[in-house]
Amino acid sequence: MNNQYYEKTTIRAFVDIIWFPMRFFGLLYGILFLALFLKVDYEEHANFINAIGPPAVEFLSYYLGWFLEFPTVIYGALVFAFWFFFYWIYTIHGLFISACVILYHILNSILQVYPIF
């Protein structure tokens, strides 16, 4: 009986001390990163990537096509990785939100090439 109680309290302590703060700070940093990505000028980052990028950047951007430009892929992958490992781990809802963020970046690059609105 004492062993079962100890296991339950150990798991409860892990959840209270580690899991909830990790989710809270992950949400906080995720919001900060998302605000940073949405506020920064797209052309400025594209010029930065082109300035420091090796020929692999041109290779990838050429073979991925015009609608998946390289900065969009980088930002989408960073947001997805950050949310998946720090806040959204083991939650399908988080994967859906991350997919929406990546889709937003892809659609944003498409609308810059073909402005509909």
Image (spheres, rainbow, N blue to C red):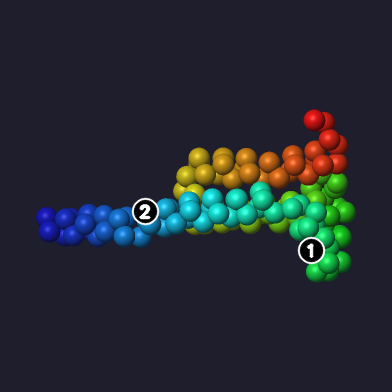
Q: Provide the secondary structure element on which disc 2 rests.
A: helix
Q: Which of marks 1 and 2 is nearer the N terminus?
A: 2
Above or below, 16 against 53 in this view is: above
Q: Provide the secondary structure element on which disc 1 rests.
A: helix
Q: How many numbered discs?
A: 2
Residue 57 visible to the viewer: no
The residue under label 2 is: 20
Residue at point 60% right, 50% down? Answer: 35
Q: In which quarter of the image is residue 103?
A: top right
Amino acid type of disc 1?
Answer: Phe
Amino acid type of disc 2?
Answer: Phe
Q: In this view, does 71 lie to the left or right of 85?
A: right
Q: How crowded is mark 2: few (under 14 residues within 10 Å), some or many (20 or more)?
A: few
Q: Quadrant of residue 49?
A: bottom right
- Rounded to the nearest whole Å, what is the CA distance between mark 1 and mark 2? 37 Å
List the single residue furthest toward the top: 117
Residue 48, which numbered label?
1
The spot of residue 102 in percent (x, y) is: 66, 45
The spot of residue 4 in percent (x, y) is: 18, 55
The spot of residue 12 in percent (x, y) is: 26, 55
Q: Is residue 83 left or right of residue 102?
A: left
Q: Nearest the camera: 6 or 53? A: 53
